[in-house]
Image (tube, helix red, strand yellow):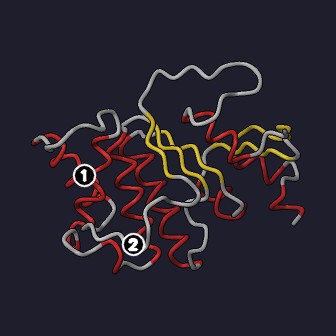
Amino acid sequence: MVLGKSTLIKSIVGLVKPQKGEIIKNAKIGYLPQKNDIQKNFPASIEEVVLSGTTTNNIFKIWYSKEDKEKATKAMKELNIYDIRKKCFRDLSGGQMQRVLIARAICSSNDILVLDEPTNGLDPMISRQIYKLLKELNKKKDLTIIMVSHDIDRAVKYADRIIEIRNGKKVFDDLSSKFILEGGEKKNG
C-alpha cells in the first residue's frame, strides 16, 4: 500500500496505524475528514453540531459545561456563523456547512487542526474565503493547521510551509515561497 495524503492525515489523527515509524502526539487534534460523516438531512442546529466538538474526548458526556458553550460561541463567532447558530444544519449551503464543521473541529482542539480537502466541492469564491479564514485562525490563535489540498495555487498563497507528496514519497518540504522558486507544481502546471 502506497502512503497517500489522506492516509497520512488519518495516521496523524490515529485512525490508521503508520506502516513505518511512529507518530507521537503531545497535543489535542481537531479533525475534519475529506468526506464528512454528517448527513445532509441531519436535523441538528449549527450550535448543536459545533457543541458536539467538545465531546470528542468524552463521548458519554450528556451536558455541556459553561466552558464548552463559551468555546463553541467563540468558534462560531470566529467563523462568522454565530448569527445563524439556531439554523438547521441541513438547510445550509456547502460553504456554511464547512464553516460549521471547522468550528466543530476547533472545539475539539486549541492546538492542531487536521483538515483533509476542506474546500473540496466548494465554488472558488467560498474556497478562497475558507483559506483566508484558516490563515486568520492560524495567525490569531497560533493554531497549527495541517491540511491536504489539491488546490496548489491557494495552498502556496495561504500556507507557510508546503510538503508535496508524489507517489507516496515526499518530494518537497520547505517554505511555500520556495515551492514556486524551486519549480513546484504551481510553476510547472
How many other residues sit within 10 Å of disc 1, few (<14), some (14-19) or many (≥20)?
many
Residue 100 x, y percent position in the rendering? 36, 63
Residue type for callout 2? Gln
Side of 8 where 140 appears, left or right: left
| Residue at 86% from the left image edge and 47% from the top image edge | 166
Quarter of the image for residue 149 reads bottom right
Q: How many marks?
A: 2
Classify 10 Å Cα crowding around label 2: few (below 14), some (14-19), many (20 and above): some
- Left or right position of 108 against 11: left
Front-most of 125 and 1? 1
Q: Which residue is mark 1?
A: 51
Give the amino acid type for the residue marked by disc 1 in the picture: Leu
Which quadrant: the C terminus?
bottom right
Residue 110 sits in quarter: top left
Residue at horizontal 62%, vertical 23%?
23
| Figure check: 130 above or below 155 | below
> CA gap, disc 2 to disc 1?
16 Å
x, y (%) of residue 132? Answer: 49, 62
Name the secondary structure under disc 2.
Answer: helix
Residue picked out by circle 2: 96
Dot 1: element: helix
Q: Circles 2 and 1: CB distance less than 8 Å?
A: no
